[in-house]
Amino acid sequence: MGTRECQHICGESSPAVGEAGKTGEWRDSFPVIDQEKCLPVRQNKPSCFLCWLYCPEAIISKTIPIQINMDYCKGCGICAQLCPAHAITMVHEEEFCLTETD
Amino acid sequence: MIFVSKKKTRKASTWILDGNHAAAQGAKLSRVQVIAAYPITPQSPVTETLSEFVERRELGAQYIAVESEHSALAVCTSASMVGARTFTATSAHGLAYMHEMLHWAAGARLPVVLACVNRAIGAPWSVLNDQQDSISQRDTGWIQIYARNNQEILDSIIQAYKIAESVYIPVMVCYDGYILSHTEMPVDVPTQEDVDRFLPQYKPHTILDPANPKNYNLVTLANPRVNAEGVLCHGYMELRYLLQEALQNSRETITTVGREFGELFGRSYARMFWEDRLDDADIIIVAMGSLAMEAIVAADMLREAGHKVGILGLRVFRPFPKSDVVQALEKARLVVVFDKNISYGIEGATCSEIKSALYGSPARAVIRNFIVGLGGRDVKARELVDAVNKSLLSLKEGVLNKEYPEWICAI
Amino acid sequence: MTESQEYYLCMQDYYEIRWHGRGGQGAITAAKILAQAAYLEGYQGVTAAPSFGAERRGAPVSASTRISPQTIMVVSQVENPNVVIVLDHTLLKYQEVTSGLVKGGWLIVNSWRPPKELDIKGDFNIATADATGVCSSLGLAVAGLTVVNTAILGAFIRATEAVGMASIEKAIRERFSNGEVGINLAAIAQTYEITKLEKIG
Ligand code: SF4
Ligand code: SF4
């Protein structure tokens, strides 16, 4: 069966989880959250959520505490860069594996 | 632009119009909604006239002044994408500057209509006519229609919208700079009522809508991919295949629309080329645009001298009407192709197309190619006659096909 | 004479008219008014074109009108006119002005001199009229400059009889605002009256 079935006549896609494939496979480092520094956790009320807003993959939840869907986190580090509380640190995959096995 | 008289019969009125005003009238009657253009000689009067229509509220369109032709077509493609009927016009360097967006409009399958007022390209500078500008854009995936006179300019623009919006391919309506753009002649201007009956509303195949967000024409990988809903979607190559397929199939639409136009307005465009006295002709002149008119005079003269001469005036260059051309040229012994363009290093573009169409067919005509009229060089009927006579003479001397084209110039 | 010329001039009522003037004198407008009047007269084929390219105020310019009972197929530039109209007699010193004018054709000049005194010899008929005099006495001017482009149509009708005054009048009414119509028509009529003709043979 060919690609005609999609019925598109130009490049077309709709926003959906996984539309661009498993972007988590692109990751070479990933965000580690220090929940004690995260503002919504500290204040125990919805606030900040800048990481939720700016994550290009839209996979950070707007919850207390925030959660990241690691299937699609591509490790870009944007969340870590803009977190005003410095609650997120990017850790290299290898390093992470080492600490895990230690 | 002058109003002359009302004809009761077809309800149209006859105006004495130059080509640029005929184009502007065509766009107005098509009820274009967004116009974006940048002035360039000899196209400028088209944009000036349309901006006046908008200013006087005779045309309910957005006229978007832009800083370049590239932006003009970017505006048209974007507006087309959100569902507006769009129009732009340009010439020569302006068209060259649009090159990237020409590909984009066709690739995104947006039914933009563009009037190309054919003008020579520098260096050296020239504001005068030849067809190098639009011929240089033949591989961008646009339908290309060439008008022979001002009536055809107006009629072709109206038809262009119907064609473009049926097959989702942009259409370029080309006409010779000055020779048509600045020359006044009688043009029947149909009524808005009749055009409304002929031309349905534009139904976009894609529409940007915040309630139903979509991504269009993002990075598309080489291979097809399964989307999040599990549907196998086109890769880059499948989309290119579809554009070619649509152009192939558009021949049907172009002729149907041309026939419908004829039924309503009394001027039929049911064929992709104009023919004159082909029935008994064994010598056939091929030309495109206004030159196909001058060729009629040349044929008159050659017939008077006892030659059986006919004319094939190419109207649609893309898609190229291969099989029809083969049929028309089958019985000829000599085909003389006049090109107002040159594909450097080989020959005139229409000549190459004719040759490629005839390959493998039963047609056995000798094909001669003459490059004429570049940069506004006047082409007289008698020069066309001389070229045919010269070809006949060398044919008699046993010279068959020539490797390269001959030029009618003073070299 | 060229082959195509012979071919076309054997057609009855076929006119190739070339206009000569200076940028700003309205040669192109006149070429268009004449085409329109001819269409109203019943000619099926009419075209009007400027000479192609850039035009500058004061520089010599030309324009053309073709008139035919049938649809016009010729799109190349006029080479062998059977009528040449000169809005500014100072242009007569340029050879292009009468070049190609066919035998038995008309040279129509805006000049106060009678045809004989123009000092021009050729196989063609000559008509002259002091359109400038007519227009300046009527006060027909644009931006302070006397314009003779419509007035000279009077001399054209007188010489060629190709188009009637009624059609010219209709064409003028369609092009000009009500205030301008009267003075232009008066200029045409007066120029018609004073036109002097000199026929060959
Ligand atoms: S940006 Fe930093 S502080 Fe703000 S919600 Fe995200 S992790 Fe918490
Ligand atoms: S911003 Fe980048 S690193 Fe942070 S969660 Fe999103 S994808 Fe991962």
Image (cartoon, grey):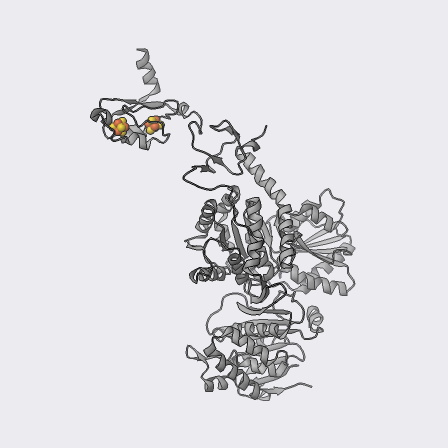
Q: Looking at the picture, how far across and down is residue C200, in whole percent?
A: 67, 85
Give the residue drawn at x 65%, y 67%: C72
Report how many numbered discs are placed on residues in the image. Answer: 0
In the picture shown, does residue B395 fall above or below C105? above
> Which one is in front, B284 or B158?
B158
> Which one is in front, B1 or C78?
B1
* Side (left or right) of C139 relative to B156: left
**Where on the image, by quarter, is ligand 1?**
top left
Give the residue drawn at x 70%, y 63%: B298
- Does residue B115 show up? yes
Say which quarter of the image contains residue A32.
top left
* Side (left or right) of A5 relative to A34: right
* Side (left or right) of A39 relative to B40: left
Say which quarter of the image contains residue A1.
top right
Q: Looking at the picture, how far across and down is residue B93, in whole percent?
A: 49, 54
In the picture shown, does residue C2 fall above or below B352? below
Q: Looking at the picture, how far across and down is residue B127, in whole percent?
A: 51, 60
